[in-house]
Structure formats: C-alpha cells, structure tokens
Amino acid sequence: MKKFFKFVFVIALAFCLLYAYNAHTNGELVQTIDKLTMIKETETTIPTTKNKSTVTLADTLNSALTDEEQKAFDIIYNGLSTHKSSVNIYQNIETDRIFELVELVLSQHPEIFWTKGDCTFSNSGRLTFKYAYSYEQAQEKALLIEKKADDILKTMDSKSSDYEKSLALFDYITMHTTYAYDEAADINNYCEVSTIEGVFLNGKAVCSGYSKAYQYLLTLCGMDAITISGYANTPNGSENHAWTAQVIDNEIYFSDATWGDGFEKNKGSNSVSHIFFLMNSEELEKTHSCNDNFSAIKSTGKNNYFVRQGLYFEKYSQPDIRNRIKNAFEANENDIQLKFANAQEYKTAKESLFDNQGIYFILKTIDPLSKKIKTDTIKYNNDDEHNTITIFFSEKE
C-alpha cells in the first residue's frame, strides 16, 4: 500500500502572535504590481523587473539548491502557479526536503494565494496540492487583489524613493490589517488569512499574510523582497512566525509588518511601531530566528528607520529630544519613537524623561504653540531589547 506524507506549513505560521508591548502611564501599566493573473507554465521560476546581472534574494536562496532540487523547485512552481492538481517529482529527494521546497516556492511567490497550504507526497513521487479555490475562482479573486493593489499604489508619489515607498507600504499594511486571532485557531477553514487575500480583500490576516502582502506591494514597486519563515519570541515562548526580507539602496533589511501592528487598535492607538521596520541581522536576532531554508539571507545595514528619520541618538540630550518631539507634533503625528545607541543612554533617557518627569517639562514648553496636547499625563512604551521609547501624543478634549 502506498504511504502518504502530509505537510501543513500554513498551520506552522498561523499561531504567530503580535509582539507584547508594555508601557507605564503615570505609574499605570498600559498596552497600548505586474498584472496578477494565473501564470502559464514557464521555465522561468523567479519573475523579476531587476537587471539580469542583479543577484536577487531569491537567487541567494536558490543558489544553495542542488541541480536536482532546482529541477524539483521549477516543477513545484509551475504546478502551483498553473493550478495543477499534482505534479511528478522524479528527482531523488527526501520527502521532508520536497516540503521545504514547496515552502521556498511560496516564500518567493506571494501571488500564489489559492493553495490551502498543505500537500501530500507519495512514495511513487507524486506531489498533490490542495487548493482553496477552483481555477476560475482564483482568477476572479486575483483580479480583485490586483485592483486593490493598484488602488493602494495610486495613492503614492511615483517620484518617492524606495525607502519612502517601503515606509508608506509598511504603514499601510499595519494600519489596514487586523490580526486574525479567531481564524488562526481554525486555519484549515480560514486559510485565506495566511495569504495576500486576507490583507487585500478582508483586512484580516496572520503573520504570513501580513508579510506576503508587504512583499507583494514591494515587488510591484520594482523592489526585491521575499517572505522569511521561522520563530519569534513572545510572552508564551518561541512561536512560529513570518516576516519580510527586502532590499533598499542595495542593502538587505528585515521588516515585520505583524509586529509593526503591535500597538493595539482597541486601545485607541492609531500608531505603527517602526522598531521592526528595516532591521539588520543583529537587531532581528534579538527576537527572531529563521528556518534553515532562509539562513543565507543576512543583513549588516545600518540605515534603519531611526537613522533615516533623525530619531537615533548616540547620547541622550534633552534639547535634541525636545526638538524631535516638537517637529513630530507640528507634523500632526500621533507618536514619536526614539532609539538610543546603547543600554546606558537608553537608561539615562528613561530616567530623565519619566523618573524625573522631564517629559512634562518638554511638553509644557511645546504646548503654548498649539494648546492642544495634554501635558499632565503621558502614555509611553519601553522596548528594553531594542533601546527604544515610544511616546504617544494625547490631545485635550
């Protein structure tokens, strides 16, 4: 009798949780596109707008594949992209490795959203896929997703830099997506939350949906990006998780749109956390670890969000902090995030701003300019691992 093996990789990502942020408020703890169509079978496995001489993130990952694995990768990609019910894998590859290749294909192709995420592989070499939709249904949804993505991109300035586009898209995904807690508990019946469909058509997703939607929009803007799967530290221990690797200004960075959504919307926060936008490997590995499939992707980039926005401080300076807060408030921003170069300067900032109540002095000197913000109470958030403080602005009622 044939033996069948089952691989359910969507479930592995389904229960990833939003990062738990803690803050104190006056002593009170608070939590605050290329056209997307069904792709015809082709020998090309990585569609890209990059120059042929450019080594993409996908190239980096796939360069580690053996010749036999690359052939199997191509077969899997062509089967999934054309909605085939099954394909034959004649290469001599272990079953677990076949499933890793399926994961690798989907990490590079967020436009393949119609798979349920599980498949079976027989000892005769037949790989059978399970789909959430028929070919016709998938085409209809693809058009809806394409239109939604086009609408999003139309709101952006075409003259913006890659960094500015990346920031705008990261903020859009986090602000317009709700984490699908209930659906994650029954992922087999709600597999769409792990794909771009969940974000673009329903506004609800788990981590892989956030990541793939962000990746998808980046690639439509001509940027290089893939989804990374692995693990992340949460209050409940290490959990399966997914995030995005992207290239900006010829440097690799990691962004986690799910954790960018860490400030709870039901607390009235209208803020995005940028701690997890454009991280290098050192920053990422404080809280995340990737699966072996993705270990070749490394980042040494230093031009993160805080450096680019002038919110990175080698030393604590109250006048400098005041100027940054003043600029943020005048720009009608809801919050400001400040990052310090090391634990000592971060500790000095916390003591000066909150233990010694320097933040109230700063707000009172800014308030006469508008007389709008509250100066007697403050909500803020500490991230001790990343030496980062987030201050939330509250307007007077």
Image: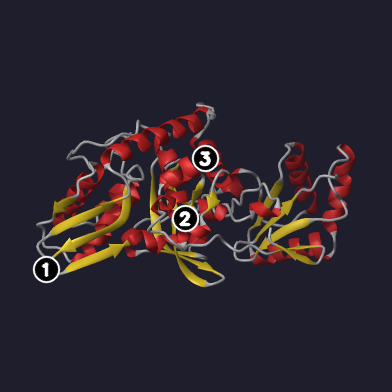
**Mark 1: secondary structure:** loop
Question: Which quadrant is home to the N terminus?
Answer: bottom left
Q: Three-letter amino acid code at disc 3?
A: Leu
Between tags 1 and 2, which lies in front? 1
Which corner quadrant of the image does residue 397 belong to?
Answer: top right
Between tags 3 and 2, which lies in front? 2
- Decide which of tag 1 and tag 2 comes sooner along the chain: 1
Between tags 1 and 3, which lies in front? 1
Which corner quadrant of the image does residue 234 belong to?
Answer: bottom right
x and y percent of residue 92 in the render?
A: 11, 62
Q: Three-letter amino acid code at disc 2?
A: Cys
x and y percent of residue 128 in the render?
A: 20, 55
Q: What residue is disc 2 on?
A: 207
Q: CA distance from mark 1 to mark 3?
A: 47 Å
User: Residue 2 — which label?
Assistant: 1
Q: Is residue 245 left or right of residue 165?
A: left
Q: What residue is disc 3 on?
A: 169
